[in-house]
Each structure stands twice: as C-alpha cells, then as structure tokens.
Amino acid sequence: MMEWELKGGEGRKKTFVLDTNVLIHDFNALESFEENHVVLPIRVIEELDSLKSGAGEVPYSARKALRNIGFYAARGDISRGIPLPGGGFLRVEVNEENYFRELKSDNLIISCAMALKEKQVPNVVIVSKDTSVRIKAGAMNVSAQDYKRDKTSLFQKYGSILREEDYNNGIRSVRYQCQGDDINRLWSNDLRCSIRNNRDLNGISPKNVGQVCAMDALTCPEINVVALTGKAGSGKTLLALAAALHQMTKKGGPLYDKVMVARPPVPMNGYDLGFLPGDLLEKIDPWMQPIYDNLEVLYKTPKDMDENRNFGRKEYKSYQYLIDKGFLEIGNLTYIRGRSLPGRYIIIDEAQNLRPLDVKTLVTRLGEGSKIVFTGDLDQIDTPYLDAESNGLAYLIARLINEEDFCYLNLEKSARSNLADRMAVLL
C-alpha cells in the first residue's frame, strides 16, 4: 500500500502520473501540483537517464530533473511516497504490466496509470505535453491533461494606437494594436508620447504605423525588454536588426558594445547541431540563414567586391566586417547559460519556439546596459510539445505586460509584397 493511501481526506486529492516530457519542459514540475500526489513511472527515470548526457537544453533539463528526484529519494522510501512541499506525496512506481501490444515508453506510462486505477487509487490523471499520449489515455478511459503551470490565456490584444482627436474625445489605450493609416502619436494611460514617423534606420523606413511604433520601442533606452509578434513579412526581424545596428553606429558613439543575434535551432529531419559538419558558426548557418538574408538587405554586397577583401571565405558578405570586428555576434542559445551579457543589444528570433525556462535563462543573463528583443509568430510553432499558450514568448508577454521597462507590439500588417501577404492569408 502506498504511503498516501494511509492518509485521510484523499477523495479531494488527485494522483498525477507524469510523462517524461513534462520534466524536460520544466525540471521543477514536481512542486507544481499543490496538495496533490505525483507518481513517476520507472520508465520516466530511465528516459531521463538516457537523455542526461551531452550539451544542450534537453540534457541539462534531464540532469536537473534527476537531481530534484534524487533530493526527495534521499529523504525516505520513494517506493512508498515522500512528502512534497504542497502536502502531497511523490512516488516512483515500478509497474511491469503493459496493456498494449507494443512496448513503447508512452504505452508503459499509460499502463502505469491504468494499474493505479485498478488498485483503486482515486482520481488518477496523466500529465503529458504529448497530444497523442493524452488521446491514447482517453481511449483507455484514463484522464489526461497538458501541463498547465506556465500556460497563458493572454492573447487578447491590448489597446490601440489612436488619432489625437480620438484621445481628446475620451478614448484611452494601454498597449499597442495599431489602427488607421495616419497616426503619429502614441498614448499610454494618461501619458502622451510623440512618435516620429520619418525615422530612417540603416536605410529602413517604417511602412506602416505598427512599424513606426516598433522603431520607437526598439530604440528607446528606457525599454529594456521588447517583444514583437506578427505574421511572416511584418518586418519584426528586419526592424530589430536595423535598430540594433543603427545604435552601434551613432555619431555620439555606440550605445551598446555588441549586437548579439540568436535563433533556437529547432532540428529539421532529425539533424541536430552536433551532426552537421564544420565549426560552431558553420553548424548554426542553416538556422541563421533568415538573419543573414536580413543583413543582406541592410548591407548589400557590391557586385564588384575586390577579391582581396574575401578574407579567405568562399563568398565575402558586406556585413562580414561587423562579425570580424566583434560588433556583431551570431550566437548559439545552447552556450548562453552561465554567461553574463553586459552592454549587449540581444535579438532572439523565432522566440515562440522557446520554452518558458529558456526565456527565463536568457533574460536573467542580461547585464548592466543591455537590451533584449524577442521576435516571433505565435501561429508558427515548430517545437514539439509547445503551443500558443505554453511557449516562452507568450509566457514572457503574460508575465511582463505590466512592467515599466517592457514593451509588447503585435504587428498585424505585412510589409512584403502584396502577393506574399495574400498567400499568407489564403494558404
């Protein structure tokens, strides 16, 4: 009999059976279930052990999760149940029964929950980030749910950009959602802020009022964290790069020591960074190509470039001198943990593919005089087990939306060709 079965008043409590992906998503998840009980199938321990080796976010999370489990295991008999801070118990369940034909990890985790139900354990619920696990569990008459701790139901848009006469008529806005074609003033609560719509950053001029507001936020020294969302072609990444590099070349001297740009290397076709040839910069090239494309727009390479400026590379790019001189760093998110980043203008592209834990890691790396910009499209999430409510970008916006030094903008208009804009809607 499990330790918690000896306790009274159990009818109100639930017994959550965790999938491995929950602990990879949040290695502190054990303490997120309040007064309820937590069961870890032995298969979860084995999977964490198989994932713990190497560099990167997944091995790191696996190691941290195992250490957390080990902390509780050292306090008593984890096969009977160890008290959790919220009042529930943690137990590792060794279940050898399999209710499926295939001996797969998902099936063994569901089988563990089914075995608990057969033992009359009340209110058994599987918690998994994997939709297929939740579907299969439901088919086997086992309750299942997503991990809910860091999910947000944020996305209603916050306010509007209004004409001055609308403001004077008593209309107020709180956040950015642009309306109209000839707006040149931004209002925030009762504070009036004038925004210049004739600004030019590295040859890039705003094409709509949303981009005017974005340029203002990206160049405002009082705003330390910026989040830009919008569909493909809305200009998020190009504007962020233009603003960052503009502030590196100001006449009075650069405002930042270096511009750092990174994107999450979401694996394609099963290839991770370690399986690609070359040094680190060459390994991350496939994921950074959209950044290079935007740099090409900002710094067009002359067709008659002299061969002696090739620097030994296959093809010299006009923006390469920024990298060679240390003004621009193309970064790998895997190696940011542990670094302190003072005096940096940091751009994290495709941030919707980050976990909340990843975003927290990035923001807490900021040093004195740094600014960080997150860009992404909440409708284009490629990372398994993340969705529009649980990704790091949505989490960041929900947590910081009322902070003075944070700005969130949703760019609704595409700045690409009419064809690209129309195809984005139709397809």
Image: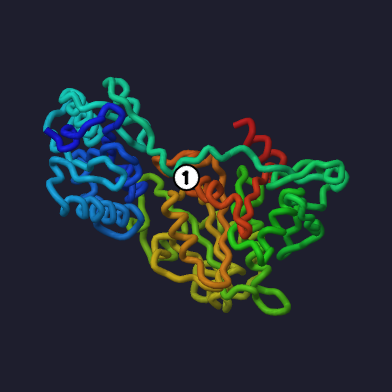
Residue 217, compared with residue 221, is above or below; it is: above
The N terminus: image quadrant = top left
| Residue 101 showing in the rendered view | no
The quarter in which the C terminus is drawn is: top right
Structural crowding at the residue carrying mark 1, measured as other residues with C-alpha within 10 Å and reported as few (<14), some (14–19) or many (≥20): many
**Would residue 221 be found to the left or right of residue 372 on screen?**
right
Coloring basis for residues: rainbow
Q: Residue 398: horizontal and vertical position, in percent?
A: 54, 46
Residue 291 location (% of width, % of height): 56, 58
Q: Residue at x 78, y 57 (%)?
A: 193
Q: Is residue 1 above or below residue 400?
A: above
- The local secondary structure at tag 1 comes to loop
- Outermost residue on the front side: it is 8
- What residue is disc 1 on? 391
Position of residue 101 relative to residue 83, above or below, is: above
Q: Residue 45 vs residue 30: left or right?
A: left
Q: Nearer the viewer, residue 345 or 146?
A: 146
Quarter of the rendering containing residue 405:
bottom right
Q: Is residue 71 left or right of residue 61?
A: left
122 or 175, which is in the foreground? 122
Residue 361 visible in the shown view: yes
Q: How many marks?
A: 1
In x, y percent, where is residue 139?
A: 30, 20
Residue located 80% across and 58% down the image: 194
Q: In which image quadrant can residue 90 be found?
A: top left
Q: Amino acid at mark 1?
A: Asn
Q: Residue at x 44, y 65 (%)?
A: 281
